[in-house]
Amino acid sequence: MAKPKRRYACQACGSVTHRWQGQCPDCAEWNTLVEEAAETVFSAKHDLSGGGRRIDFVPLDGPVPLPVRRKTGLAEFDRALGGGLVPGSGVLMGGDPGIGKSTLLLQTAASIARAGGNVVYISGEEAAGQVRLRAERLGLADAPIKLAAATSVRDILTTLGGMDAPDLLVIDSIQTMHSDQIEGAPGTVSQVRGCALELIRYAKSRDCALVMVGHVTKDGNIAGPRVLEHMVDVVMSFEGERSHQYRVLRALKNRFGAVDEIGVFAMEGQGLAEVANPSSLFLSGRDEPLAGSAVFPALEGTRPVLVEIQALIVRLQSGATPRRAVVGWDSGRLAMLLAVLEARCGLNFSTAEVYLNVAGGYRITDPAADVAVAAALVSALSERALPPRSVWFGEVSLAGEVRPVAHGGIRLREAAKLGFDKAGGPSGSAGKAEDRAIADYMGLGTLLNLVDRLVGSA
């Protein structure tokens, strides 16, 4: 009999190799290769074309009733989910330690339980007394939640099989679960994959909404195999800086709704509070405009959010190398924008230090922020404030052109709702003149038009 080959699986990325080494060849992480039992290989004589159970086919317009979403009681959570929890769905929520994942799910479980739903909360990281202590601090001790502390998937499924199927099942967290049918410690690739498969299979067979908490790596990605994100229906990321008040719940994958939809919460003494107007968190609220400050109407999913971009230019007297410090934006895109301003607009940033900050700890990935950043830089360089109650948006090309962006009308309507009466952006990006929510709209063909408007032509 041939000797079975050894295989080693990386606990960070899930790649498999047949030789142990200190560094993973795929993700370059150190000491993450762990030996696993080799998979069973069937020979060619095994025929799977017979002996199985026949499956039933259902047409798309069949008489089977469609699942009805269940509201969680938290409007921001429902918005991120696309309207509520779908029965039989699997939701994976990741986030940094201490960001508030368990607090959010405990509040959600309490809200559904108080509304008459059957809720089961399984904690694998904390004892039941610790969860009860948090619930008492949040004022949720009276919620009829079935709480347990367990890590064995066999025990959990056996217990759930002897009772009515819950409307919501919370597993905190999937990395602490283990199955006695799989070799390896809890948190390994095989354990996470196997335990998640069994839990998702139970949820879909019993029409139970399953929410699993997932740990994250130092890079912010959900720990465990990448296939875990393919197995679930919804992948959510709970983001935010612990030094700031706000938290953003972002949908990265959603089979039942829009992707990149967000819900905004604020961390308070009684837990997470919903923020109906997120723009109030990221705007300073001052009346007098200051040099180097521009307001950008960002778009998260279908929700517009107004954020403040701040720039500071410091001239150097000596021949020292100037710094480029960025918080909340891509440093590579800032370098590109500075190069365009120098090459196409004749501005000199080579002898100055540039500091750029997105107020409130918000992080921007929208390319439509180019014009707002350029306006803040030009305002800081010329020490002239931008027009009061004005917003700026648009994408800048390497040729200095201001390119159109998506949903310009939605951005302008949100700005007008908050009292902004001036806007600058791509020509024609906001639609027809009669459809614009802001009458005083400055159409910009190139970045040089923006510089001329702000500092005047030479």
Image (cartoon, grey):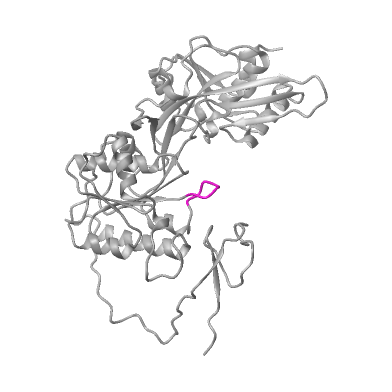
- x, y percentage for residue 35? 53, 70
**Left or right, residue 126 beside residue 139:** right
Residue nearest the observer in this picture, 456 or 318: 318
**Left or right, residue 249 beside residue 456:** left
Query: Is residue 82 in view?
Result: no
- x, y percentage for residue 410? 41, 27
**Left or right, residue 259 beside residue 17:** left
Figure disc tally: 0
Residue drawn at point x = 39 percent, y = 63 percent? 178
Q: Bounds of the magenta span?
A: 216-222
Extreme-top residue of the structure: 288
* Image position of 36 with respect to 363: above or below: below
- x, y percentage for residue 288? 52, 9
Residue drawn at point x = 25 percent, y = 56 percent? 60
Quarter residue 455 falls in: top right
Residue nearest the observer in this picture, 182 or 454: 182
Residue 218 inside the magenta-drawn segment: yes
Residue nearest the observer in this picture, 104 or 57: 104
Q: For the stretch drawn in magenta, what is the main secondary structure?
A: loop
- x, y percentage for residue 443? 53, 20
Query: Is residue 14 in view?
Result: yes
* Image position of 433 with respect to 6: above or below: above
Quarter residue 204 falls in: bottom left
Looking at the rendered image, the quarter that the C terminus falls into is top right
**Left or right, residue 447 beside residue 283:** right
Extreme-bottom residue of the structure: 1
Residue 41 inside the magenta-drawn segment: no
Residue drawn at point x = 45 percent, y = 41 percent? 98
Quarter residue 143 falls in: top left
Residue nearest the observer in this picture, 195 or 289: 195
